[in-house]
Image (spheres, coloured by chain):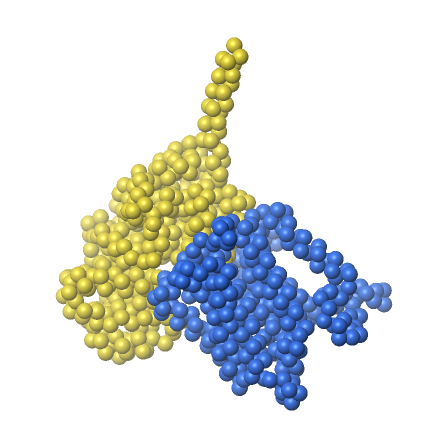
Amino acid sequence: MDMKRDYYEDVKHFSSGVMLFWFAALMIFLLLYPFLFKNYYVYVANYIAINIIVVVGLNLLVGYTGQISLGHAGFFAIGAYGTISLMTLANFPFFPALICAGLIAACFGFLLGLPALRLEGPYLAIATLGFGLTITTIIGRIDILGGRQGLHAPDLIIMGHHLNTDRQFYYLVMAIAVLLVFFARNITKTKVGRAFVAIRDAHIAAETMGVNLVLYKTMAFALSAFYAGVAGGLFAFVLRFIEPELFGFFLSVFFLTMAVAGGLGTIAGPIAGAILLSFLDLELRNILNIPYVGEWLKALSTSYFSLTGVSNIQFIVFGAILIAIMLFEPLGLYGLWIRMKKYWMTWPF
Amino acid sequence: MKKTLFAVLFGALVVFGMLSTGYCEIGVTDTEIHIGQWSPQSGPAAAWGAVARGTDAYFKWINANGGIHGRKLVHHYFDDGYNPARTIAGVKQLQEQRGMFAWVGGVGTAPGLAVKEYLMQKKIPWIGPAAGSWHWVTPPQKYLFNVYPLYLGDAQLLVEHAAKKMGKKSIAVVYQEDDYGEQGLAGTKHMLEKYNMELAAAVPVAMGDSDMRPHAMRLSRSNADAVLLFISPVAASRIIGIGKAMNYAPQWMSSSTCGDCPLMIDITQGLYEGVITSSFGMLETGEKVGDLQHINDPKHKLVAEYKKDVYGKFAARDERWGYTFVVGIGLAEPLVEAIKRAGRDLTRERLVEELEKMENFRGVLGRITYGPLDPNNPLTRIGQQELFLHQCTADGGSRILTNWIETEYIPMGH
């Protein structure tokens, strides 16, 4: 199953006609989505798409290159602040501002990649964590970026059209998300992607085979930061107001959790992880509306954990998901999918 | 004949249309009024969750007493964990799928700003955001009515009291690095400039700072004889504790955020005794000063009634009768009053009209006054500008130092 017989088969965008069909069906579904669902679910889709961009980028770094990052909220913040300030202070149109902000984040990613040449595992995690915490403190002290009082996003105008509603914004976010996911998938099929994987699997062996560690490690950080920066720029227009506290440590952990839950080292896995956890993040508060279960959970929570409702449910559920994945399926949702596929393809044996 | 018939039908249609607009407001039925609210019940700002629980108990009490003009208040509040993305989701879902008549409270500047434009575009009234921020009134919005006083006012009162009443010569400020702390700093500087005084030290506290020794050291070196605290209760308790260990004993003064004397005396193990704090809501206070009376004074009917009935009968189990809980009641009072005044024929426009007519309304907070919307005059939507000072006592009570004092609005912010 899925055995590649030659190089060209490996780099093909679609391994079969069936894949192409499902891809076309997905694109049509995404195009029609705003007409099929209520406005609230369009907002949810926008939120999910933004998280997909970050997590696919993070996965290039963590899943493919084997470098940990607990500071992606910092790149996300740079993208958000960069986009808004370039638009308001330098009168950049939206797209140039978004791309420049992504590139600024990429520059910071490159800089953070330099210590990564000497650090590994928990030491790298601490270094990136420090970056994530420091960047918001620095932004909070820059008056031109609104300091601690934050920044308002300007009107979003693209080719003379104001994007005011969730539905209008949806097409922008979704187009960028599809483009960046496609780009990430392409990268993994190129020399660069193979170098990333070689570094992850055995960096000394990779180096002896001619992989330039300095170049590819810093490139992985820069690329991943670019994704987070672009997503941050889009997120600023979802919230319409940003302040440093929004980009805290927990956000970085949340991004990493989505990547791990989905399945590191794949493209589909982090997308699934981002969809699942983003959806739960927004929807778990409605758990009380489920008949019987909601009442039972509320009674349990108010008896032992909280004064009202089911506060902290997100933390509990995310923690449980992570523990379950570590115990039962380290490849995450993607691993589950592979198991299911194998089961059905070999059924009844 | 045909023309007459047409005119009659047209007239009937118009009358029917007018009648139906009177009873077909979103979120209002013959028996219910749906009000939305968000608040963090989890996460870093969970302590502020008591605001929504205060409002909830208040609405339940109103319903138990027959509701308003035959309608019950249905309170929909959700936990946003102080995460604006979740605030937007909750607000949009409740608004679009359940239909809220109005929104009340809503903790936090960032969560509030994330939904402000949405609510204003849809012309949905939002009363009493639970954060003292310029953003609510600059520029004033037709459907947004502020209640929570700006922290600039706290700084004004505290500096005036320190410099004029207590004769302090050197004043320093410790401020949290956010909108709240920046307002305190700006207000302090503004007042010191007015009195031709220099700021002895301005010490920032980052949100995650837990070690307060460097901050206390800087204050001690400044030799300030009065220190204003615009920080969180936990940071305030730490800094006072370290100050005590260093034998540095200025007159500590704090904003209303650290003004819950029973709580502060408890977490500082008594070190909060003598700290002067500003307040914009009545709590368990000392002797009568002007309009302010002791909460246990039977003459002070409103607060006593709230404590006995709203808190006593409808608060969640283990809920604490504290400042934040009372603020939750106070922020909803103008909304409830305006709904009462609007009568049975309740629409959003009627509600706004009644709020705009509100003058010197007093519940458990200071006087609240609005006016017809003037885009250039924030005072038409600022609501409350009154505060008073009190001093914490060793037993967890407090001594009232001033009557309600009207503070000045200083235009600032972005």
Residue A48: x %, y % from top left: 58, 59
Above-or-below relation of B10 to A11: above
On the rendered image, what quadrant is the C terminus of chain A found in? bottom right
Residue B407: x %, y % from top left: 23, 53
Above-or-below relation of A277 to B242: above
Q: Residue drawn 81% across and 65% down?
A: A345
Q: Residue drawn 31% across and 38% down?
A: B357
> Residue placed farthest to the top in the image?
B1
Any part of residue B74 in sight? no
Any part of residue A177 in sight? yes
Above-or-below relation of B334 to A117: above
Judge from the rendering whether residue B17 lies leftward or rightward of residue B232; answer left or right.
right
Q: Colour of chain A?
A: blue
Q: Which chain is yellow?
A: B
Residue B180: x %, y % from top left: 34, 61
Q: Residue drawn 47% across and 31% down?
A: B21
Above-or-below relation of B188 to B30: below
Quarter of the image holding residue B371?
top left
Judge from the rendering whether residue B375 lies leftward or rightward of residue A160; answer left or right.
left
Nearer to us in this view, A293 or B77: B77
Nearer to us in this view, A296 or A79: A79
Q: Residue drawn 31% across and 40% down?
A: B372
> Residue placed farthest to the front in the image?
A159
Residue A61: x %, y % from top left: 58, 75
On the rendered image, what quadrant is the N terminus of chain A found in? bottom right
